Image: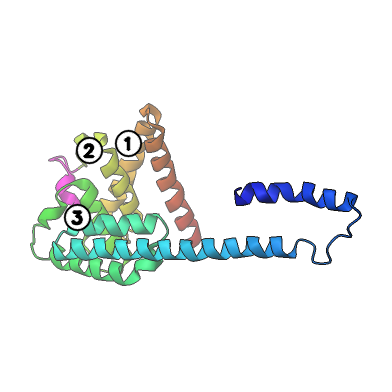
Amino acid sequence: MSEMSAHQQLPSLAAERRRAEYHPSVWGDFFLADDAAQERMDFDDTSKQQIEDLKNEVKRIFEVAASDDNPRELLNLVNHTQRLGIGYHFEKEIVEALKQVHERSIESVDGPSFASDLYTTALMFRLLRQQGYKINSSAFSKFKGPDGNFDESLETDVRGLLSLYEASHLRTHGEDVLEEALAFTLTHLASTNEKLGPALIRDEISRSQRQFNIRKGLTN
């Protein structure tokens, strides 16, 4: 008989005892409650071990990406852990990862080869600036056309636009390229949001906009 079915039958057994004129036990359901508490403790211990195992696995992934000298993977790892709200578990790994990314980013005056696309460039800019690194916003100039405006071909790169939109909220006074980036991304993300079918992308756009509207409200 399973533990669940045994517990379910306890009330009927107690009723039979009362009909036989036995007095209810002075212990009541003390031992049942104690069993339930023990189950919760066992579950908590198991959960804690699973969490520790997962944390160690994430740390191992950080180590592999760092040893492989893979800045793109490091950026994505930092981004994912922070978005999931678990970045505080990996503060040391995040600091080391962004330090490595920054060192690679300043190797070439033309910008790092691993950040040639809009998504990675904007992600690198945002994460490094959030960490306190001085990173030049001129990195976004390569995405402009001969007319000095952002290339219209970028409007189909939703992932890149979202990344640029988030990066633009870390602009400082006088960073015209990021002011232009904000206007450009708002225009095209609003248009894309109306035309998109997949709800997941629409939700991601809305989430990003809410996140930075809240941050703006807190800093004003």
Q: The disc labelled 2 sits on which kind of residue?
A: Leu
Q: Is residue 198 left or right of residue 46?
A: left
Is 179 a magenta residue? no
Give the x, y percent position of residue 21. Answer: 91, 54
- The answer to whether marks 3 and 2 mark residues whose Cβ atoms lie closer than 8 Å is no
Please name the residue that numbered disc 2 is placed on: 154
Which residue position holds label 1? 188
Q: Where residue 107 is drawn, which disc sits there?
A: none
Residue contact at pointers 1 and 3, CB within 8 angstroms = no
Residue in the image at 26% along x and 35% along y? 155
Q: Residues in magenta? A: 140-148
Q: Residues within 10 Å of mark 1 (few under 14, many from 20)?
A: some
- Nearer to me, 40 or 116: 40
Q: CA distance from mark 1 to mark 3?
A: 25 Å
Please tell me whether residue 96 is drawn above or below residue 177 in the rendered image: below
Circle 1: residue type: His
Q: Is residue 146 magenta?
A: yes
Q: Point out the tag, 1 or 3, that comes first from the N-terminus.
A: 3
Q: Say above or below: 171 vs 13.
A: below
